Each structure stands twice: as C-alpha cells, then as structure tokens.
Amino acid sequence: MTKLIAPGNWVQIKQVVLSPEERAEQIPEETRKCPLTLLVKGFLQKEAELGDEVTVTTIIGRHISGKLVGVNPPYEHSFGKQIPELLQVGKQMRTLAQKGKRP
Amino acid sequence: MKLNSYSAVMDRKNEIMKKALGMDYEEFEGEGLTFDYERMMEKGGYSIEEVKKIQAETSVGNTPLIELKNITAAARSLAGPGKGARIFVKDEASNPSGSFKARRASVSCYYAKQKGYEGVVAATSGNYGAAVASQANIRNLKSIIVQELFDSHGIGQPEILEKGRKCEAYGAEVLQLTVGPELFYKFLLILEETGYFNASLYTPFGIAGIETLGFELTEQVRTICGKDPDAVVVTNAGGGNLTGTARGLIKAGAFETQVIGASVDLSGLHMASDNDFNRKSFTTGHTGFGVPFCTWPDRADVPRNAARPLRYMDRYVSVSQGEVFYMTEALAQLEGLERGPSGNTSLTAAFSLAQEMDEDQILVVQETEYTGAGKHVTAQLSFAKEKGIDVKIGDPEEQAPGKNIIIPSDPSLIKVSDIEMDNLRKSYLRNSLKKNGLLPENLSVKEKEFLAREIGKDICFVENSLTNITH
C-alpha cells in the first residue's frame, strides 16, 4: 500500500529541465544522453504519494512543480573515514620544521 | 507567451541580463572588439573606501594575517642556503560565511538592495552560494542558489552537497541540477521569472569586493614586516580572486608585488562530462576553470567579465590533488589550522615557491576557507576511494587526474609546475579573433592596444603572435 503524504510536509521534488533531445549541442555525448534534471525542496501543497506530480512552495515562497521523490531527505554527506595515507604527514613535516628553524 | 526552449531563452540572454544587472553593458563597448574595462570597473564598481564601508556593515573582511612559522621552517630545510621566504596566510575562513567569497557577495547584495531588487540569484556550486545567502540575509533580501551537484546516477559531489546544506542553513532556495553547462539556461529562466538581481561572481561589484583583500594584506604586511609583500599567491579558477586581489595590491601602492596564480591540475577531465564529474576531488581552484577563463573570460554569466586574470597575472603554476591534500594535512598538523582543502591550492604552491625565494622575502597566501563534512580531506579521499580512484603514497609526478591521487611520499616532492603564460596569451588572442569573427590583418591599432592590455603584454607581442595565428 502506498503511503499518502500530507500537505505541509517538507519534501523534495524532481523536474526534468531539458530532455536529451533538448540539450545543448556542444556537450559531451555521455552528458547529452541524460536529461538535465533539477531537485528542489519545499512545502507540499496537496496530499500526494511518492512519484506523483506535485507543486511545492519553496522556503522563499515560490511555487515549483515536479515529481515527488522524497520527504525531508537527510543530509548524508559526512567526514568519511580517516585516511591512512595521510597519517605520515604530521611526523614528516614536524621533522623538517625542526631542521629548518632559524635561531 | 514567451517560448522557453533552450535556444529561445539563450536568444533573449542580453535582455534578461540587462534587467537582472540593473546596468547596460553596451555603454562600455568600444571600437571593434574593444571595450572600456576601466570605465566599467569605475562605473559599475565602488571605490575602495566605499567597499570597506559596505563590508564593515556586514562584518566582512579585516581577517587576520597569520605567519606560518612552522611551514616556513619546513620549506627552509628543503631550500638552499639563504633561501626560504616567510610564508603568511590571510585567514579568509573567518569571514561570516567561511570564505573570501563573502567579500564578493557583500557588494552585490548591497547594490541589489540599493537598486530595489527583492532578491538575488547566483549560479554557483562553490562557497559563493553560502556567501550570497549569508549577505542577503543581513540585507533582508531573498536568495536563490543554482548548483551543479549530481551526476545522472543521482550521486552528489560531497563538497557541493555540503555547500548546498550551508545555503539551506541560511534560508536560501537551493536548486540542484545534474551535470551540464545548460545550468545557465535554467539560471536565465529564474532571473526572468523572479526579477531578482544576478549576483554573478563576475560583475564589477563582485571584483570590487575582493580589492579590499589585496589592500588589507598589503597594509598588514607593511605593519608586520615594514615592507611590501614580494609575492602573493592566489588560487585561480574563474579569475576573480586573482583580478580583485591584484587590483587591491595596486590600489595599496604595492606595484612591485608579484601576482602568482595557482590551480590544481585536472588536465584530461572534461568539465561538462557526466562520467568525469565525480572523478575529481576538487570542485574549484582547478585548471578546468582556470585555463579556459584565462583564455576567454567572457564565457561567464555576464556580458563582459570583470575578472580578467591575464591582465594581472605574472606567473601561473599548477599543483596536483595529492599535493594539496598533503599540505592541507600539514596546515592542520603544523599550524593548528583545519581549513580547505580547495583554498589550500595556493598554500601548496607557496610551500614550493618559498624555496625559490630569499629568506628575507615575504610570500602571502591570500586565502583560507572553512572546512566541514563533505569538503574535508577525509571526506574527499573517502569518496575518491569509493569511486575507484587509486589513492596511494608515491611521487606526485606520476599523478593522473581521474585515475589516481598520489600523496607525496616526502614533502621534498611537492613542486609547482609552470603553466606557459605565453601559450595562454596566444590562446586568448585566437579566441578573441574567433569570437569576433575578425582576421589579424583587419585589426586597428586601437584594437591591438586593447588586446595588449588584455594579456598584460605590449603591442609588439600582440603583432608577433598574430602573425603566427595567420600562418
């Protein structure tokens, strides 16, 4: 059963800005074969399900339409893992700095 | 009803721009391919005194100049006797939105408010978005930021994801697009729909805002060292940072200071390629912007670009991604400053350049930028590894952008590579003729003089180069 999302929810929509046929001629082939798409967030205007065509009101009050793709998607970018390849840097540079100190 | 096809919108570009900039660039156009750059900067920009006042109102500028004593000592231990300049860094991360871009945004937002615009729009995947959103808030303007963020598989570049988050934190509407230069088309449509100001990076306002950076650092170096800086190294992408800083140095009377541009080498990667998009670990400060914007500045989102780096640049060098990651780590470990990484491109170049200079000389790295999730070296290198990029310790000379990232096995391997300036200048001349549909033999003296100023050379150089272009 699909879940209805109530109006007023903070959601993300996706819009096709240019289809592959509409894209600029000078761009590389691999880019041209994909549509130019846009993601934006806003408050859902009417009750809808994921995948529906909807209109949202953005944070500054503009109305934008597109396919409903998410409800308040989280920020998932992170600091990643520590990088073992960089762990020698501090020691190397400190050794050099000691050698290069002027009286 | 207006047609919104790609070509229809591009055809009314000039009309849209005129409204969205509140100025008509036509009035600066001159004979043939010439235009009056200085008049544009005067009329469109503000004096350094006015900019200082505008920036003081929104807490921009007057950032600390920090001497990097430990990094200088490390550079000296690799340099020959009597060599190893003192390295200073301008801690631009202490601006309200965490980068020097606040300087550019401050003037644009001030101007937009003065002209009665309701909001501002900027097309940027960089720190500039947050800068515009932050400055717009202080001036009570709405803001829209248009980013290139995802590849066609929906994978966002971590650094740009973070920049998008920061814009949202400031209350901006953030439009996030997949890869492609047609972002400009969407940008034009938004300008038209909203009637907001085009807070482009490349207006005279955007450049005037950076002049205070060059001015301030000169005054600071004079106070600390009792002399002018011998060289300033600038991370170069679209050319605005370099142009504005160099103009500020001149306005401060630092006429002898060498201006050095530095970019991360991303040769071989196509900037409009969906495949290459997530194979780079730097989204700015790289040769993919630096070189094309040098050789044809008017590719920007304004009729005439106020950033014209070849007018001011004395030398242009590149460094590799792995070298910048190394020096970003070094800045944290030796100087206790966790910044960057993109903004540390100039720092990386400085570590190598200082070794060529004398011990009593002063070398200024003119920016830092905030770091955070997504942007950080750990985030970028973790992402690169996930994308199958070979991250390893070795000799940076063996780097291949998009395939590997080589963390130098020893700091002595960190070396700048010179980008041949005369080739860039000749490329600029070729582009200028091509874009204007002109042949070398038809150019007037005025046009040749203009071209000479554009590339920072004399008319003889232009004439000699033009001869080679014909044949």
Image (cartoon, coloured by chain):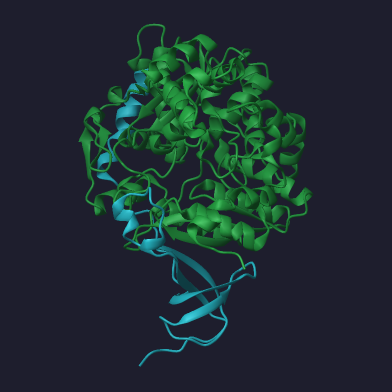
In the rendering, at what x and y percent does residue A93 appear?
Answer: 34, 28
The residue positioned 42% from the left and 26% from the top of the image is B427
The residue positioned 57% from the left and 19% from the top of the image is B453
Q: Is residue B177 left or right of residue B111?
A: left
The residue positioned 77% from the left and 50% from the top of the image is B115
In the rendering, at what x and y percent does residue B400 appear?
Answer: 24, 36
How many marks overall? 0
Colour given to chain B in the rendered image: green
Identity of the residue furthest to the front in this view: B442
Say if residue B63 shows up in the picture. Answer: yes
Q: Nearer the viewer, residue B322 or B221?
A: B322
The residue positioned 37% from the left and 6% from the top of the image is B81
Quarter of the image where one finds residue B141: bottom right
In the rendering, at what x and y percent does residue B417 appear?
Answer: 34, 23
Colour given to chain A in the rendered image: cyan
Is B56 situated above or below B131? Answer: above
Q: Nearer the viewer, residue B343 or B435?
A: B435
In the rendering, at what x and y percent does residue A5 appear?
Answer: 48, 86
Q: Is residue B451 left or right of residue B254?
A: left
Quadrant including the N terminus of chain B: bottom right
Quadrant including the C terminus of chain B: top left
Quarter of the image where one finds residue A96: top left
Identity of the residue furthest to the top in this view: B81
Is B82 situated above or below B462? Answer: above
Quarter of the image where one finds residue B229: top right
Say if residue B235 shows up in the picture. Answer: no
Q: Is residue B333 left or right of residue B215?
A: left
